[in-house]
Each structure stands twice: as structure tokens, then as C-alpha cells.
Amino acid sequence: MSQPRSIFIVAGETSGDLLGAQLMRAISETSKAPVRFSGVGGHKMQEAGLYPVFPMRDIALMGAAEIVPRLRNIFQRMNATAKIAAKSVPDLVVLIDSPEFNLRLAKRIKRRNPSIPVTLYVAPQVWASRPGRVRKMAKFVDHIFALFPFEKTFFEEAGIPCTIVGHPVVERKNMMVGGMAFRQTHDILSTSNLICLLPGSRLNEVRRLLPIFEGALELLLEEFPDTKVAVPVVPHVREHVLPRLKEWARAPIIVEEEAEKYALFNAADVALAASGTVALELALARTPAVIAYRVDPVTAFVARRIITTRFVNLINLIVDHPAIPELLQENCTADKLAHAVGELLRSEAARKEQLSYVDKAVSALGTDDLAPSIRAARAVLALLEKKGAKASP
């Protein structure tokens, strides 16, 4: 039997946990040799076989206001993770997204053991802010598995080998079904509007956005009184979200199962969502959407001075057009969100126009016969083979 391979894999948030689980399963199914996984991830990666070194929630943070009070703990976790990775000498390190944490982690792992290959799965968006950082990354990143075609030239010109694997979210396209059954289960008439609210997967996102979403909903219900509302809730923010939702004047439908969440996307007339990977899932479901986000003032001040792109939503970035409304910071208010969502509920033309751009973007994400996670798994295994060949006498 072939010698087992070891991969140290780190994800720092819910979307990364899902990408990591997809990648791990694809590697296990594709590899001719057994593969052992250790590192940091959530429950999905643990279900896929990850041996965790500490809980993912310890690093699932965003924004200066949340990070600064826990900075000591974050760096302790970062240093401990680097120490464990370097000491265990895995055949490969795969760091998934979360660039604020993972780029620093990559540097520490390389400092402790330069012989360990360190890779990134999901390229950090340095092309969107401070592009000069990419040449520094070449000193501690050996390979990047990127999602978008335009990233390959950018990174390889800086000296970092890059493989385009496509966006794993497209693998969920066939899961966006069950809308009619969802409406029947929850007694929602075909003539009633159904709004899906997605206030985020991080605790700080939810704390900041949920009250604004509630205010927007109250305004929408004045104009559209027959509207139903559903809110998907992820496990690690459940305890914070559920008590708040129970206080709302119009009790929303709570969705906790993944399959039901995708059925909701399929059923909804429009979604109001925090910026993130969920925007791509909504695009796959062809659900018209409004994207919102707000961070603390310090983070916003810094971001405005370093971000060079026109948009934050990937759909808009891909088509280079404001197809999906982005209401950020001072524009992320209850009245502006209600107006944008209301326009999509009122206007069939507005929905059709948005979806025409969405369809173009989804096509560019890589919806062909080969799943992106399989492409990524093959790229990972090719690096392992290359490392094994170099190690052979």
C-alpha cells in the first residue's frame, strides 16, 4: 500500500469550512494513497475527516473593532498553529481564504520550516488593494489555487505559480431546488412575496446588520403587508440570532438545515444579504438580491484608502457593472435597503435586468463538466507527487 500523505489545512470562517470540506472529500476520492488531514476548520471539515488543533471560531473575526480586543489570543493561536504545522512536517499546507490570518500564518510556518510547501486556496484579493504586497508573498507562498482566470497572470508575474481551479460554489448549483415545496411546507401562497434575509455568518456581522435589516423589513411590510420573511441561521451564531428574531413584530421563518436554505433561495422573490460567498449562491439560484455591509469606522477608514476596485460583490466584479445593488457603510441604512429591495419586488424589468448579468457571471465562474473541487484536488495531488519525486533518492 502507498504511504499515507499528510495535509495541514486551515480555514477561518464558514465559507472556508465548506470549501475545505469539498476539497478534502475530492482529495480523498481522487488520491491513490491514504490522506490524513489536520489543522483548523469547522464542523463540515471535521465531518470530512479533519483532526482539529483548535476551534475555528477562535479566528473567525473581521474588522478592527472585533480583532483588536482579541489580538493577543489571535496571535497566540497563529503562533501555536505555525508551531504545530512545522513540528508535524506535513507533505503540504493548504490555507483557505481568510488572508488576514493565513498570510501571517504562512510566513510563520515558512520561518520555522522552509522545506514545507505552503499553498493558498482562494487567492487573496491583493489585486483589489495594495497590489505591491504580492511580491512579498512570493517569499512564503509556494503555489496558489485561484478561482478566477484573471488572477493567474497577476500572481505568476510576481513569481508565484498559480493554478486556476474555478469557484467551488458552482458545485451547489444543482442544490438550488425545492422552492415550491418550501412554500407549501410554510403555507406561503404563490401570490405572496417571500424575502430571504441573510445578515452574515460572523458574529460581528450579525450584530451590526441584523438591527438594520429589521428596520428595513418593517418599512417593506408597510408597502407589502402580505410579505413573508425567512432567515437562514448558521450554528455558531444561532444563540445570538434566535432570541433577537423572536422579538420581531413579524416572526420570520427560521431555516437551519442546508438543504432547506437552498430551497429557500429557490423559493424567494428577493434576498437581502451581507456581502460574501452567499451572494454567489444566490446568483446560482437566480434569486434577485441586494447586498449590504457595514464595518466599524476604523476598518472603513482603512479600507477606503487601500481598495482599488469599483465593487465588493463578485458578481459585479466579474461583469464590471453594478448589476446587484451594493449598499455599504453610510448607505447601509434601513430606508435605503428597503427602497432597493422594494424596487426588485415592484419591477419585473429590474429583476430581469439583474438576472441577465447574473447569468453571465455564473457562466464565467466555471460551470462545466469538471467540478472545481476536483480540479483543486488534482492540483493538490500534483504538488504532492512533485514533492514526492524530489524526495526520492
Image: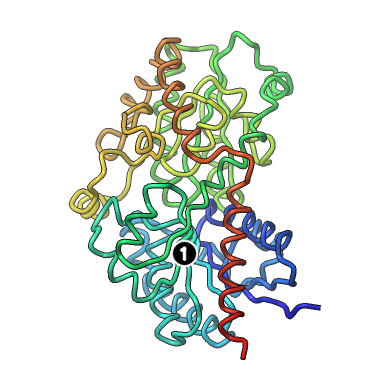
Return the x and y of residue 323 as percentages of the image width and height: 36, 26
In the image, taking residue 190 as reference, residue 150 lies left or right, namely: left
Please name whichever residue, 128 or 255, is drawn nearer the observer in this view of the structure. Answer: 128
In the image, taking residue 223 as reference, residue 137 lies left or right, namely: left
Picture layout, residue 107 above or below residue 145:
below
Which residue is labeled 1 in the image? 120
Picture layout, residue 116 above or below residue 335:
below
Return the x and y of residue 133 as percentages of the image width and height: 26, 65
Name the residue located 27 percent from the left edge and 33 percent from the top edge.
331
Quarter the N terminus occupies: bottom right
Name the residue located 38 percent from the left edge and 58 percent from the top edge.
124
Picture layout, residue 18 above or below residue 217:
below
In this picture the colour scheme is: rainbow
Return the x and y of residue 338 as percentages of the image width and height: 38, 22
Name the residue located 52 percent from the left edge and 52 percent from the top edge.
165
Return the x and y of residue 49 as percentages of the image width and height: 71, 65
Picture layout, residue 68 above or below residue 189:
below
Farthest residue to the front: give it: 393
Amino acid carrying label 1: it is Leu
In the image, taking residue 71 as reference, residue 389 lies left or right, namely: right
Quarter the C terminus occupies: bottom right
Name the residue located 53 percent from the left edge and 55 percent from the top edge.
16
Please name whichever residue, 191 or 173, is drawn nearer the observer in this view of the structure. Answer: 173
